Amino acid sequence: MYPKLFDFGEVSFLGIEFHAVLHTYGFLLAAGFLIALNVAARRGKKFGVDANLTMDLGLWILVSALVGAKLLLLFVDWPHYRHDPLSLIRSGGVFYGGLVTAVLTSMWFFRKHKLSAWRMSDILAPSVALGHAIGRLGCFSAGCCYGKPTTMPWGITFTQDYAHDIVGVPLGIALHPTQLYESFVEFAIFGFLIFLAGRKKFDGQIFWSYVALYSTARFVIEFFRGDLARGFVFGGAVSTSQTIAFVLLGFSVFALSTLRRFPQKRTA
């Protein structure tokens, strides 16, 4: 759609000349993170968690998520990035890779600061959904994570040569707007989690509800994705993300049923 938000042309900085571009994807990704972090800090403060502590955690999550997303992308499409390593910098990454490293980093942070893992996870979960929803709008603007060809009236046709050169999105063909599908789902999940937060029965309920809902949605949306570089398993029967989604869905159902047996104080 609009991969470049602003094109400043050739600029010079410290004697170095380069072409400066503010990409819409990067702008929306940053905006999503800042908005999500603000929501998390406000929710944390409401439940007695220092806002500065939440901000610190957010920065750790940002760095670890970016690294994890890139690592999983590198893993699922190693042949491509082996021959063109610089394209890894331009690519957005795989959300599940970022989610896993963010969770591991969060667990370390919780332990270091003696915070309740499930309580903090419940505080953060809605923000993850909100930030991801905004970030997917960035994917839509860049053309990445595109869908399969469709004859549906809501099909989206990309026309920007720049988007094709960067992410390989097909031009002149109506495609499923899978980025918008996922963004809409994440906004809906965010709203539901906020609603559920006031009615939770045990710590961990919000976080694992998010994992279950997102995994289900991602598994379905993957059937409409058209970008083959995301990786497939079992002879191409399912994508890497679908496999991860299936495992996480099963684990989240198990976690919810287990934690439900030990009701805890409503804290978030």
Image: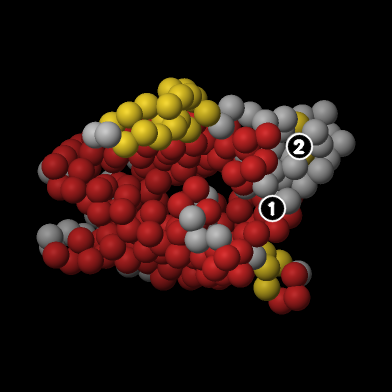
Numbered disc 2: secondary structure: loop
x, y (%) of residue 50? 13, 43
Residue at horizontal 82%, vertical 28%? 153
Residue at horizontal 81%, vertical 43%? 149
User: Picture quarter containing residue 174?
Assistant: top right
Q: Is residue 67 left or right of residue 227?
A: left
- Toward the bottom, the furthest residue is 234
Residue for badge 2 = 171
Q: Which one is closest to the eye, mark 1 or mark 2?
A: 2
x, y (%) of residue 262? 32, 67
Residue for badge 1 = 227
Residue at horizontal 68%, vertical 68%? 232
Q: How many numbered circles are shown?
A: 2
Q: Is residue 265 above or below residue 27?
A: below
Q: Amino acid at mark 1?
A: Asp
Q: Is residue 119 left or right of residue 215?
A: left
Using a 10 Å C-alpha cutoff, classify the residue at mark 1 as few (fewer than 14 neighbours), some (14 to 19) or many (20 or more): some
Q: Is residue 159 above or below residue 196?
A: above
Residue at horizontal 45%, vertical 58%? 69
x, y (%) of residue 179? 61, 40
Numbered disc 1: secondary structure: loop
Q: Is residue 265 left or right of residue 240?
A: left
